[in-house]
Image (cartoon, helix red, strand yellow):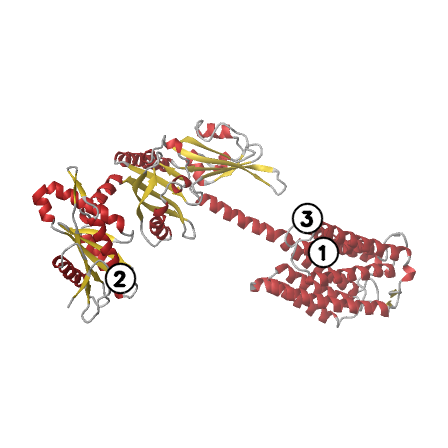
Amino acid sequence: MSIKSVSKPVSWSIVLGVVFILSGFMPPGRLFSDPEHYLALHTALEFFSIAVAAMVFALGWNLRHTTRGGRLVWLGAVFLGVGLIDFAHTLSYAGMPVFVTPSGADKAIQFWLAARLLLVVGLLVFALLPERRWPPACADGVTAAALGIALLTMWVVLWHQDWLPVSFIPGEGATPFKVGAEYVLAALYVLAALMLWQRALRDRDASARWLAAAAWVLALAELYFTLYVDVSDLFNVAGHLYKFAAYAMIYRAVFVSGVREPQQALRREQALLRALIDSVPDLIAFKDPQGRYLGCNKAYAKAYGVRECDLVGLREETAMRAAGNLDGAGADGGVVSTPEHHEEWLETVDGGLRLLDTLRTPYRDENGVTLGEIRISRDFTERRKMREQIAEREQRVMLAVESAGLGVWDWDLRSGRCVFSPTWCEMIGFRADELPAHVSAWEERVHPEDWGDIRAALEPHLGGATDSYRVEYRIRHQDGHWVWVMAAGRVLDRDEQGAAARVVGIHQDISQRKTMEESLLQLATSDPLTGLWNRRHFTEMMRGELGRVRRGQSQAALLLLDLDHFKRVNDTHGHAAGDIVLRHFVNVVDVQLREADVFARMGGEEFAVLLPCIDALGAMRVAERLCRVVAASPAMVEGQPLSFTVSVGVAMLHEADQAHDEAYSRADEALYAAKHGGRNRAVLARERDTAPPSFEGGAVSVSSG
């Protein structure tokens, strides 16, 4: 709140207060020899007050739909009633013609007191009302009530004045009732001034400051009316002049609040809007409902080579002809009823061609009535060139990717839409138009066992923990077989919360590589003659099982098997016959083992079996069964049966073993004992000082110590 805005109403209040005090020392002499000589001045002063009251009512009524409409409607309704009663007071003043009943001081004073009481009550309520818009019914009701109060006052004073106490006696002056009423009114005006001033300080409202000053001056005016003896003496005239000053302040307050401040705010908004549209590089123009230009921004005027002042009031075709551009802003001079979007070419003043992306949209008032059209054009010539260059590059990249046999996928996570390239579809036996463009087309074809690997790679990347996504998995071909693919991708877009919105990647068919890897793995871990695990793989399995035994999780046994007199078979029947015997032996033994048992060829005619989750007694029973079954199952060589036997060394894996070699050494010693004990038997290696268990089939135990 500026000092200047506060000082003016305060200064006037102080000056008028000082004048009031000084006038109290003056005698109440008559200023006019005849009351009729005072009528012209009195009527002029009162009509000024009535005119101000009418203006306040008009402003309040027309601003009833604004945010401050409730308070302004109230103030306007109060001044409507006050103005009507003051009009009756003016017509009833002493010396005026008959107004229903003879005019006189007492009749005029009755109207005066009623108007002043209505005004002070209105100001007190105005100081308390909140800033809000009133419903139409409330505005109509308050206005009707004020009009009713004015008419009721006229009815009582004009037709039932005898109901009212006498307020003035010619030659004696104001009665005690009149003086007391004026003092009460003065006190109420002072209270209203204080409340309005407090409201002005709280809301930083300049109009409330002037209303507070007006209420103070009206209080001084009422005090003047307690002093006069004749209707044309000094104090009566001073009271009316103070009322004139107060109404001038009211005019100042309402004019600032209802007219000047809104106009200033409108000019500021217009300046802001002008600066805003002129700072925008887009071409902006606006028209009235008949299609005539109302204005444009600097970019529009520069692009078409015209001045805004020359454009205003012209229709489209006239304006473009004046600008020398018949192919630019369009031949359609009408105003659109719905938003329209299109592209158009503009030939600039320097002869260049620019591509414009234009939006034409109507603007309407609060009732939906079309007020005109706004046209916004954006120059996207360079953007179009960049878009074409990017499209060309993408096409080259796509050709390179397709030539390399890579399938491309583009996944929108928000909608689930996923676009697959033709190569991607061909990998699984489809044409591009046979698969729906949705992620479900991929999900339903993934091997169920591979989802764990996919989630382990995809979810961290979607969450932002990794830079890219890469995984290998199987996907079902249209004819039913599984195709191994390598998928790689990266998040391109994320939403405002950082969640992945779009992922793009490739698929590469790696089925041949996987087949080769499986073949290499088979060669590295299996025996080519028998198909069993080789020594290397068996050793790894032994290490793992020994770890479980050392942790106390299970028991396990190792069987070493060696075919008896196998060299004799090779020497007598040849190596081909030996290979037949070895494969036959593997088939016979494999049938006798459990799925969890590990069967391997260690080299030559030596084999090994790892038996997890078994004790010594169970291991010996397995070994003895193998000896019996092998002896009873001769191999067929050149159509003739060829019998052979096997010796077995059995050793338990112990928690004290530091390495698998210790169990292997014990089993080897037991095998040696079986060979020297007559072959075709199983021998269990035991720890020193351990009594041998009882076994069937003549098997024995040897000490490992």
The first of marks 1 and 2 along the sequence is 1
Q: Earlier in the sequence, mark 2 or mark 3?
A: 3
Q: Is residue 334 above or below residue 531?
A: above
Camera-nearest residue between 622 and 148: 622
Nearer to the camera, 600 or 381 = 600
* Dot placed on the residue nearer the N-terminal end, 1 or 3: 3
Mark sitting on residue 341: none
Mark 2, secondary structure of its residue: helix
- In the rendered structure, are the residues bearing label 1 and label 3 in contact, judged by CB atoms less than 8 Å apart? no
Instruction: Name the residue beneath numbered marker 1.
Output: 74
Residue at the image point whose x is 36% and y is 43% from the top: 446
At label 2, the amino acid type is Leu
Task: Say which residue appears at 72% left-offset and 56% top-offset.
Answer: 74
SS at badge 1: helix
- Disc 3 marks which residue? 62
Q: Nearer the viewer, residue 260 or 295?
A: 295
Which of 562 and 116 lies nearest the eye of the viewer? 562
As measured in the structure, the alpha-carbon distance from the residue carrying label 1 to the one carrying label 2 is: 110 Å
Residue 75 can be seen, yes or no: yes
Which quadrant is home to the N terminus? bottom right
At x 40%, y 34%, the residue is 435
- In this figure, which residue is indicated by the disc labeled 2? 617
Tell me the kind of residue under disc 3: Asn
* Three-letter residue code for mark 1: Trp
> In the image, 303: left or right of 548?
right
Q: CA distance from mark 2 to mark 3?
A: 110 Å
Question: Residue 527: horizontal and vertical position, in percent?
Answer: 18, 47
Q: Is residue 348 visible?
A: no
| Quadrant in which residue 68 is drawn | bottom right
Decide if residue 526 is on the left or right side of residue 359: left
